[in-house]
Amino acid sequence: MATSRASMWCRSAILAGLTCAGALGPAGGVMAQALKDVRTPDKPLVLRAQGSFFVGGEKAEQTQGELGDLGPGGHIAVNQMYVRYMVPQGGERNLPVVMVHGATLTGKSWETTPDGRMGWDEYFVRKGHPVYVPDQVGRGRSGFNQAVFNNVRAGSAPPSSLPRWLRFSDEGVWPNFRFGSAPGQPFPDSQFPLTAVDELSKQGVPDVSFGGLPAPNPTLKALADLAGQVNGAVVMGHSQSGVFPLQAALLNPTAMKGLVLVEPGSCPATFTDDQVKTLATVPILVVFGDHRDTPTGLPTLPTWQARYEMCQALIARVKSAGGQADMLAPPDRGIRGNSHMIMQDRNNLQIADLILKWMDERVGARKGSRK
Amino acid sequence: MATSRASMWCRSAILAGLTCAGALGPAGGVMAQALKDVRTPDKPLVLRAQGSFFVGGEKAEQTQGELGDLGPGGHIAVNQMYVRYMVPQGGERNLPVVMVHGATLTGKSWETTPDGRMGWDEYFVRKGHPVYVPDQVGRGRSGFNQAVFNNVRAGSAPPSSLPRWLRFSDEGVWPNFRFGSAPGQPFPDSQFPLTAVDELSKQGVPDVSFGGLPAPNPTLKALADLAGQVNGAVVMGHSQSGVFPLQAALLNPTAMKGLVLVEPGSCPATFTDDQVKTLATVPILVVFGDHRDTPTGLPTLPTWQARYEMCQALIARVKSAGGQADMLAPPDRGIRGNSHMIMQDRNNLQIADLILKWMDERVGARKGSRK
């Protein structure tokens, strides 16, 4: 059944001139271009401001060799966090939203979807919210500290001192991101735009954050500082960074107007009662899609259903401490087939509307107006 | 003289709560935040469309170890080029401009300046042009191929197989980017916003393109393809990528409506007469700032004055072949003190206006309307 649907889907993709996805695609071949698929909204986007800046960062002193052996040794900036922002005209006093991406990805996650539709970054702006999209420290335009790699190359440090770089294969993504039970075998109701799955593949970048960053991850303080700099924000994390809003809230709770955990990789049971008391001062929403019991292909990690249950347990603890915490699971509302990349799913704006409704009910639309 | 100005400037910076720049800054300390410095324009920005997509890319098959040893081996996308774009309302038929950044930098170069003013990306949009800002393959949101790093870590490849990662120290940047003759000693007429030089430092990312990318650099074909996908564009490069518009034009000359080489690292004398004949079919502008004879601190590389002279020689060859090629050197017009980071200088919009005037005179404002 799934196989026959998959081959139908692949045939359509080929007829449309698109690459058939993942393991079924032409390995080594040049992939389809994406600009032709980008769709333009009907109404213009009117911005009060847009641009980019950095949060945090510190200076490190490095040798000529550590810097790649061209110019003189000296100081560089490390551990800074790049942030791109858009502020809607008339929305400068509205509640800002910070959107942080997951593992092996960048802020691109929230921009134009793989099949060319509007991303959540623009949609939340069109709904009146200033939106801030960082690249996690160590990735994308935030950069990383290259010294150890050049030292190993020069023989002055052992190969064992190298951190690993993580990327997910297309084949691994299919079950882990819950597009289907196996590569090329989509769930019949899958909401992910699978004809464009190769465009998601292009969003992947090597991720050094599992062993190659200072502890604690500098992104956490940068998020806490960013929320403070914009005078309070809803902070939204995804997957690996799903837990980041909780951790940032513990660093700067008064700057957090709301925490949105989209398909979080973890809702730790290890928070102390005092920490839970702090989290109970901020409205929390957890979002999980469908097909959560799919085996992920990553046997050392819990299934998404197990993570969902961890989050339900945390929600219960926060509520017991007097807080407001909610689970948004679209299947409970009859909305089926949402994947781990729910912000890119075909019904991504429907899910965004549910989050916006929660923000309206639990947080309020304007800065400092928490209900 | 320069020293006394520098210490005055540093005292002002400290009084203003800013970090004093480069080698004079507090090494290891946390640096000043930047959001507070971001300035908002008077008039809203009205966009027909904005978003991001990828150009190019191919599939590579990698082992579990090459992927960082979490999920299964399989295929990933490599050598794709991330592009962010903005199209002004009413400007969708106007001439698109592609802006490519230089070494150890990302597309951030063209966005909000280090001291919070409008970048050329937004300024060209406000002047009616669709603007496309890529991250070069191997950097930023375009990612890089991590396999060799994980192989060396695992002991299955020798350290000598590692490519180097290049970054420039703050100390090296001062003379090489021509902020002053030495770190902390600005030229009296420097146009670079030196109170925010630490924010430029944060724009730096490790650069693997000197030995760590396939040859030819995949960014060249991606630029040629991007210009074709938007039905013709002015392609602008900077520093390391100053030569890229020329190289992309040789791959796809009919897609190039104009080539703008901003402080190019090279204007090769090695182009054949046939190649120069092709380049002569496209209007070319070369832009160089002031203080070009400053020793760069990179004795293996030519001074900026030597590069300026190489470009004058190429301009002469293109003209001899019947082409249109111009040098824009602001000092020739009495505009003094422009640095290598001319798109971020305090008079960056004045320089942009000169480029826009050239585009108007030599290329025409609309797609396909070359005069």
Image: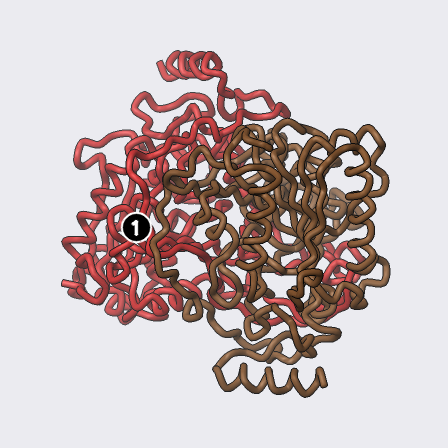
Chain colours: A brown, B red
* Residue A260 position within the rendered picture, expressed as x and y whole percent measured from the top left: 65, 45
Answer yes or no: is residue A333 visible. Answer: yes
Please tell me which residue lies in front, B314 or A79: A79
Q: How many labels does the image show?
A: 1
In this picture, is B129 found above or below A280?
A: below
* Residue A53 position within the rendered picture, expressed as x and y whole percent measured from the top left: 48, 37
Badge 1: few (under 14), some or many (20 or more) residues near its Cα, within 10 Å? some
Query: Residue at left 48%, top 31%?
Result: B35
Answer yes or no: is residue B340 visible. Answer: no
In the picture, the quarter occupied by the N terminus of chain B is: top left
Query: Which residue carries the number 1 mark?
Result: B310
Query: Residue at left 38%, top 48%?
Result: B238
In this picture, is A15 found above or below B202?
A: below
Disc 1, SS: helix
Please tell me which residue lies in front, B292 or B130: B130
**Which chain does tag 1 point to?**
B
